[in-house]
């Protein structure tokens, strides 16, 4: 097999993935719609004539992260079974093409199916609520402030669990979750210790790139150069997903069953 990248081979691999898992994907979408319907029914019952549309997007992001990471942790689930894993590794496609196929279904296809299911159920629910003229639905306001950050976080989390599906043979979701929590806790503790040793007692962090010192005659704010600050913010937003993709690629290359 030619080890160079091929779009036609990737297209065939994506089609094969669909034919092999079409029933599972279809049942998953139906289950997701059913779960959303139940959640929105409880939401409608819990509110009496006054509905805050922001609540629906809280539901959106909570269920997006929950269902998305579970789905992503099964991206390369075949590798947990010896027979299926051996067959999957023998498919005539490069590791990069197999990774792209997994990313396509776990990021693009899942997100498209989730958004279609969510907005379908949401619109039906709101249409039923509007049938009663005494009901009031407040427009979306606050959620817009954090939506962009949550989208970046979702792509990073999804990519992490895709890596976990390659790295862990059994219980990938549980092990990836525990590993992420441990790393996050270690990072928070390390950051706290470093900040306490760098910043004096009369100072406090303002952001990841600035801190303030309180004293006479007043407060002083110290900030990194703008280009350094911009670089740190860009890295914090975009670096995680590519790092996890690269790690997943090399893990796939060395994978043996």
Image (cartoon, helix red, strand yellow):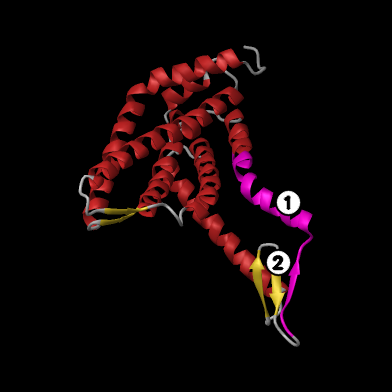
Locate residue 196: give its quadrant: bottom right
At a point 42% along the width and 48% down the height, the residue shown is 61
**Residue at which label 1 appears:** 231
At a point 75% along the width and 70% down the height, the residue shown is 222
Helix, strand or loop at label 1? It is helix
The residue positioned farthest toward the front in the image shown: 133
At a point 51% along the width and 37% down the height, the residue shown is 162
Q: Residues within 10 Å of mark 2 (few under 14, many from 20)?
A: some
Q: Is residue 111 left or right of residue 33?
A: right
Looking at the rendering, the stretch of residues picked out in magenta corresponds to: 218-244
- Image position, residue 165 (x, y; %): 48, 37
Locate residue 190: give its quadrant: bottom right
How far apart are the alpha carbons under marks 2 and 1? 14 Å
At a point 55% along the width and 51% down the height, the residue shown is 149
The one of 197 and 210 positioned closer to us in this rendering: 210
**Residue at which label 2 appears:** 210
């Amino acid at each position: 097999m030619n080890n160079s990248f091929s779009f036609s081979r990737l297209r065939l691999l994506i089609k094969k993935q669909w034919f092999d898992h079409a029933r599972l994907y279809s049942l998953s979408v139906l289950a997701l719609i059913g779960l959303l319907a139940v959640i929105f029914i409880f939401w409608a019952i819990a509110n009496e004539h006054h509905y805050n549309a922001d609540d629906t997007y809280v539901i959106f992001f909570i269920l997006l992260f929950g269902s998305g990471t579970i789905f992503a942790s099964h991206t390369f689930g075949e590798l947990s079974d010896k027979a299926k894993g051996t067959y999957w590794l023998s498919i005539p496609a490069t590791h990069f093409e197999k990774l792209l196929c997994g990313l396509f279904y776990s990021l693009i296809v899942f997100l498209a199916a989730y958004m279609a299911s969510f907005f379908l159920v949401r619109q039906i629910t709101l249409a039923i609520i509007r049938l009663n003229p005494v009901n009031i639905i407040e427009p979306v306001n606050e959620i817009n402030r954090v939506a962009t950050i949550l989208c970046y976080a979702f792509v990073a989390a999804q990519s992490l669990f895709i890596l976990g599906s390659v790295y862990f043979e059994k219980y990938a979701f549980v092990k990836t979750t525990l590993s992420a929590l441990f790393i996050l806790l270690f990072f928070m503790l390390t950051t706290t210790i470093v900040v306490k040793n760098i910043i004096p007692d009369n100072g406090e962090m303002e952001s990841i790139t600035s801190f303030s010192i309180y004293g006479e005659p007043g407060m002083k704010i110290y900030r990194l150069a703008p280009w350094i600050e911009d670089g740190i913010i860009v890295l914090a937003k975009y670096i995680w997903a590519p790092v996890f993709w690269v790690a997943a690629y090399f893990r796939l290359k060395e994978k043996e069953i």
